[in-house]
Amino acid sequence: MSEKLYLYPIWLRLWHGLNALFFLTLLVTGISMQYSDIDFPLVRFDLAVTGHNIAGVGITLSYFLFLTGNLFSSNGRQYRIKIRSLFPDLFAQGRYYLIGIFSKQIPPFPVTIKSKFNPLQRVSYISAMYIMFPVVAITGWALLFPETIARQAFGFSGTLLTALLHIVMGFFMSIFMIVHVYMCTVGKTPLSNFKSMINGYHEAH
Amino acid sequence: MKKVLSLILFISLTSWCFSQNNTGTGNHEANSHCLDCHGQKVYGYVNPDDGNSVRKLMPVDFRVDSVLFYTGAHHTFKCVDCHVPEYDSFPHPNQLRFEPMYACLDCHGGDETYAKYHFETIDEQFRKSVHSPETLSGFTCWNCHDPHSFRINQRTGETIANTIAYDNAVCMKCHFETGSEKMLLLANEKLKPMSVSHDWLPNQELHFKQVRCIECHAAMHDSLLIAHMVTSADSAVRQCKECHSRNSMLLSSWYRFQNIENRSKNGFVNGILLNEAYVIGASRNEILNILSLVLFGLTLGGILVHALFRLKINKRKSHE
């Protein structure tokens, strides 16, 4: 019988579920608009634009739930990086994912209640939630209120540059999500981490 | 207690109704004295000297279309808000002909209520334009924006097509065919017919219907939705690619315009959520498309290789 740790409180699971729903909608509608082809539309163009707008507003609201939860619970501490040992820690975790995992080595940073993320997760989650998400959300809202965007910047249309930044950040967020979903299969069993996000309990290796 | 609450509610509702009546259409009665003559093509009076009834044509420049006035931006005004009360007497005293007219900034300048409309910037841009009073003596805001009828379509939920037609009609009042009378008031210049001056432009009719004159004939400004720095004909947009390209100048103005129009028509929430405006030019960036596909491909490839190795090793371990 493996050890079970209660890592994911109800508000966090609720936010995570909402975030996943909105993110998937944004991903599908975003890809549909980006590579849209009149003969083979993934989602009908007008529906894709409207769906993207609705999910964009939704994910912003759920982001405030995430920020509030992190502000008033101990979960916020999980996003603190130990700067001094950052690079050796990242190297150790990277080495585990690339080599150690195949020889069934013990993870260098086992999951505990105090530290549920390994250094690589911390850096990627901070980048996604505190850098990439704010950029993609601010540019997205700016495109909903285009009168707030400068008309010209560096000789280009401000709207074009804002849209490009939004799209580029959207790509990085999408890549983050693909990798995130795959890395969740690296648990005790391929599905155990997904179950954790439903019942709140993490199963240790 | 219930009675007191009902009384408060009754008083509030009654005073609200009265306050509503005092704005806009509430000035009908006060203005009707002026519009009885100035709202008609023909006006009449009784000559006090001989007692004869006289009928005369109201000169076009002194005529006020009451329908346009009460649907215009200044519909809440009384005539005497801008004109001196001495107009009350008839015949009007001669010296009133020289009554100075208010300019936009006299009411709208330096007032926080109107700050969001950037009247000062509009004035600044106007003074740099070919319409500047230094270039065209006597040119004022009123030449384009008749205070008795001017409408701001973006705030009234008008369709884009109607807004374009309305805005272009403002230019056409003077810039219409050879020697428009209004144009002659400002300059002795004879204008070429539009079809001739724009003979280089493909699909002329379509362009005139779909694009506002100012998109090509005015320099844009960051804080103004409607450009007011009208440039000389030589500086107007003539290159197709300036509009028909990814870094299109129209991307800014039209995307903004569509969004704002959508919000005013469908309300704040629906205008944002159900807005179908989209920056197509940006998403059609081929380099970005290729780069993103390569990046997605590499990510998925890496994941696939990693997953296959995991599977293989798991199988080997389970055999052992």
Image: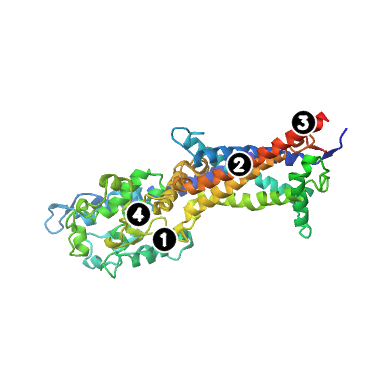
Indicate the quadrant where residue A200 lies. top right
How far apart are labels 2 and 4 at the CA level?
Answer: 35 Å
For disc 2, the neighbor class at 10 Å (few under 14, some 14 to 19, many from 20) is: some
Q: Tell me whether marks 4 and 1 sit on the same chain.
A: yes
For disc 4, the neighbor class at 10 Å (few under 14, some 14 to 19, many from 20) is: some
- Horizontal side of A122 relative to B250 (left or right) equals right
Q: Circle 2 is placed at which residue position?
A: A58
Q: Foreground: A95 or A157?
A: A95
Q: Tell me whether marks 3 and 1 sit on the same chain.
A: yes
Q: Position of residue B264 (x, y in %)?
A: 45, 45
Chain under numbered label 1: B
Among numbered discs 3 and 1, the one appearing first in the sequence: 1
Q: Tell me whether marks 2 and 4 sit on the same chain.
A: no
Under mark 4, the amino acid is Glu
Answer whether residue B11 is visible to the viewer in this image. no
Q: Circle 3 is placed at which residue position?
A: B315
Q: Circle 4 is placed at which residue position?
A: B215
How far apart are labels 3 and 2 at the CA level?
Answer: 43 Å
Q: Tell me whether marks 4 and 3 sit on the same chain.
A: yes
How far apart are labels 4 and 3 at the CA level?
Answer: 67 Å
**Residue drawn at (30%, 47%), measured in percent from left and top?**
B207
Q: Tell me whether marks 3 and 2 sit on the same chain.
A: no
Q: Residue furthest top?
A: B319
Q: Circle 1 is placed at which residue position?
A: B221
Q: Give the mark toward the camera: 3 or 1.
A: 3
Q: Foreground: B282 or A54?
A: B282
How far apart are labels 3 and 1 at the CA level?
Answer: 66 Å
